[in-house]
Amino acid sequence: MDDYLDVVLEFIDDVAADERFALGGISFGAYLALAVARRRGPQVAGLMLSVPEVNHSPREELRDRRFGTPSILTPRGKGPGLSEYSEDTQWLEGLPFRDLSVALYRPGSNFRAPTLLLFGRQDAPFRYRTYWRLLNGFPRATYAILDSAGHTLWTDRNPLAAALARDWLDRIQDYRPSPSASRRARGSTAE
């Protein structure tokens, strides 16, 4: 997992160097985007995490299962804006996942840039519950759980998700980190 993160960080170094940038990701991409924000917080001007994955190592999976997750594929209706099934994460237990070495889920760790956290109500519930516990660490966050959306949120509820993304981009344009916060952040790995 750290190799994936290293490739993303190398790309950012090549493209953005010391410039500030906005970063977004969907699913596993959001998992990596959060890791980038934890490593490069002062450089990240905005963060969007859409249906972010949560660590799926056996240790993390057991911790998150206490919140409940579907144990089988569950039909949940058909029609406009509805995915056919809820997500089943049981199959993940057999995969050789390793956690990132970055502490992703640090309560009390502040990320001050505008943030958008998007979740599907019909996706696995441990996703939005895990991030809800961290919400205080994102003081400029919009946190939205979209009904009639699963892990395919951008297909299920595109107009609403797109409107929230446009709002996030507008907030990034208006965001100016305080000079004292920028100076303090240069000496640490998180903002």
Image (cartoon, grey):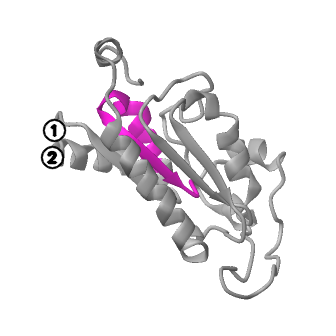
Looking at the picture, does residue 159 appear above or below residue 187? Answer: below
Task: Name which residue lies at 54% across and 23% down.
Answer: 109
Locate residue 114: give its quadrant. top left
Residue 26 in sight here: no
Locate residue 139: give its quadrant. top right
Place of residue 61 in the rendered image (x, y in percent of width and height, measured from the top left): 72, 48
Looking at the picture, does residue 83 appear above or below residue 67? Answer: below
Q: Are marks 2 and 1 in contact (CB under 8 Å)?
A: yes
Q: Nearer the viewer, residue 84 or 98?
A: 84
The residue under label 1 is 17
Task: Name which residue lies at 82% across and 72% down.
Answer: 72
Q: Amino acid at mark 2?
A: Asp
In the image, the segment drawn in magenta is: 32-52
Q: Amino acid at mark 1?
A: Ala
Looking at the picture, does residue 190 appear above or below residue 122? Answer: above
Q: Nearer the viewer, residue 188 or 156?
A: 156
- Queried whether the magenta region covers residue 129, the answer comes back as no
The residue under label 2 is 14
Place of residue 85 in the rendered image (x, y in percent of width and height, measured from the top left): 74, 78
